[in-house]
Image (cartoon, coloured by chain):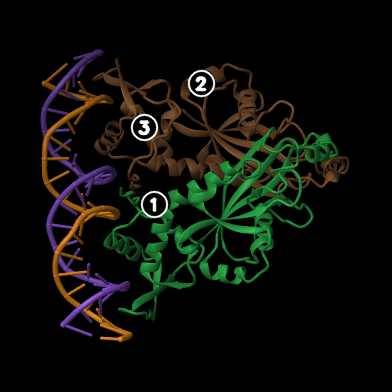
Chain colours: A brown, B green, C orange, D purple
Amino acid sequence: MTDFADEQEFLQNYRIHDYDVPLTMVDMAIFSIIDHQLQVLVVKRAEHPCKGLWALPGGFIDVHQDMDLAATAKRKLKEKTGVDTTYLEQVASFGSATRDPRGWSVTIAYMALLSTDNIQFHKNQSLEQLRWLPVKQVQGVELSFDHQMIFNSCYKRLLNKVQYSSLPVNLLPEEFTLSELQATFEIILDNEIEKKSFRRRVLDSGILQETGKLKRGGNRPAKLYKKLEQGKDHCFPRSLESKT
Amino acid sequence: MTDFADEQEFLQNYRIHDYDVPLTMVDMAIFSIIDHQLQVLVVKRAEHPCKGLWALPGGFIDVHQDMDLAATAKRKLKEKTGVDTTYLEQVASFGSATRDPRGWSVTIAYMALLSTDNIQFHKNQSLEQLRWLPVKQVQGVELSFDHQMIFNSCYKRLLNKVQYSSLPVNLLPEEFTLSELQATFEIILDNEIEKKSFRRRVLDSGILQETGKLKRGGNRPAKLYKKLEQGKDHCFPRSLESKT
DNA sequence: ATAATAGTGTCTTTCAGACAATATCGC
DNA sequence: GCGATATTGTCTGAAAGACACTATTAT
């Protein structure tokens, strides 16, 4: 909950609106799969407005430091997670007179996918005000500003892309088995995929390369694959059907 | 060509950058089919910067008048074409330190589709500084700022959507025949579509409703259809293949 | 041998492409 | 009837779904 009297006072002293120009910033939904769940990173706001509420990471464009919008997004990502090489995609922009009490504001929303090995690194940092929030719980948490809507927009984009593209490989480490890849797709979809169909799709598309190595575990070892063209996002000729 | 000395002076007197906040605006690619060609509306810039060059219609957000980004886009659309009910879709945002000589700037790009009957209305207005530019000729025209890139982004979105959605119905008047609809798709694709496949796709999808009327011309009359759910954009289960 | 996971064979289903055939109009 | 456009019939093909089957490991 925000302290109202305090916030009122803060807003009265906030003067950027005098210039009749909208505030412009970048916000991002950083996704990762942790504990077999799709989760999104949220930050507790340290300052007004919405002080104390959870929010998507983001902030103002630094016109002296950032070359472009993607640079602002990368800077924010680095600040929050320590990671700087990730899949990053612009999703949509939201702007209105009312979405931020400081005045007319625009935010450019990005989506980032963090691979699980990046998370290992990140978990060891001191993260007082950060929290991974399972996407299924987002609706139950009060988010700052219109971040609920921004999150929905990013989540929807991700859900869409699982159905027709290879995007989710970016949530896995460098090398992975087909079963791990399928599990990743299934976690995002929140639905099962037929094993044979999945393997056919992925292998026939030629986006993966066998590394020659095997992942050994309790049972039959599995071939390890890696992405062939890093950064490129393959689109399959047809979409997956949703079961159920 | 722009007058350089003049523009330099203009820029030196431009002071908004002092506030260390990016300029934020909206630009749009307004598409329509005119003379059996897909065309995009461009405006001759009356002011610096890029004075005298063609540009996509657009402008600054009016924080006192516009409720949100879509309102800015609608206002600009209305100013340039006199039309206010059209298909409007946000495409992407472009922001960098260098895209506008006035300083760090962000533009939110929209795409609008004008139906041919809207164009009739619009053609009767006085349009000194407006021009419909066939998309095939855009590359040959020097556009202001990064508008070439913005145009490409919007055009690409449109090309993509022709392949898997019913979006192009928005380029037609209220009632139309299947042949007219197919011709619209073909003009955008710049490729032929197999007649039977096209009709099956469209009719089986249930997005159209027979009006009961017929369009009579020299030959066999054609059934007239209209869109069932206005504004909604149907996605087909598979994409069209490109011939050739 | 058994449990568990990896991986394959193959039949069905869905929907787009090809292309020929038929229908309905004005003349 | 003729030319032109509208509309349909039906075969083929590509890629996804279903599901049973085999393969390889640790124990």
Label 2 element class: helix
Badge 3: few (under 14), some or many (20 or more) residues near its Cα, within 10 Å?
some
Label 1 element class: helix
- Frontmost residue, B230 versus A178: B230
C-alpha span from label 2 to label 1: 37 Å
B189 displayed left or right of A118: left
Q: Is residue A96 above or below residue A81?
A: below
C-alpha span from label 2 to label 3: 18 Å
Q: Nearer the viewer, mark 2 or mark 3?
A: 2
Q: Quadrant of the N terminus of chain A?
A: top right
C2 displayed left or right of B105: left
- The residue drawn where x is 37% and y is 81% is B216
Q: Nearer the viewer, mark 1 or mark 3?
A: 1
How many numbered marks are there? Answer: 3
Label 3 element class: helix
Badge 2: few (under 14), some or many (20 or more) residues near its Cα, within 10 Å?
many
- Considering only order in the chain, which callout, 3 or 2, is on the residue closer to the N terminus? 2
* Image quadrant where residue B78 sits: bottom right
Q: Nearer the viewer, mark 2 or mark 1?
A: 1
Q: Are marks 1 and 3 in contact (CB under 8 Å)?
A: no
Q: Amino acid at mark 1?
A: Gln
**Disc number for residue A183:** 3
- The residue drawn where x is 75% and y is 42% is B3
**Is residue A55 visible to the viewer in this orientation of the structure?**
no
Query: Pointer 2: what residue?
Result: A118
Residue B217 locus on image (x, y percent): 37, 79
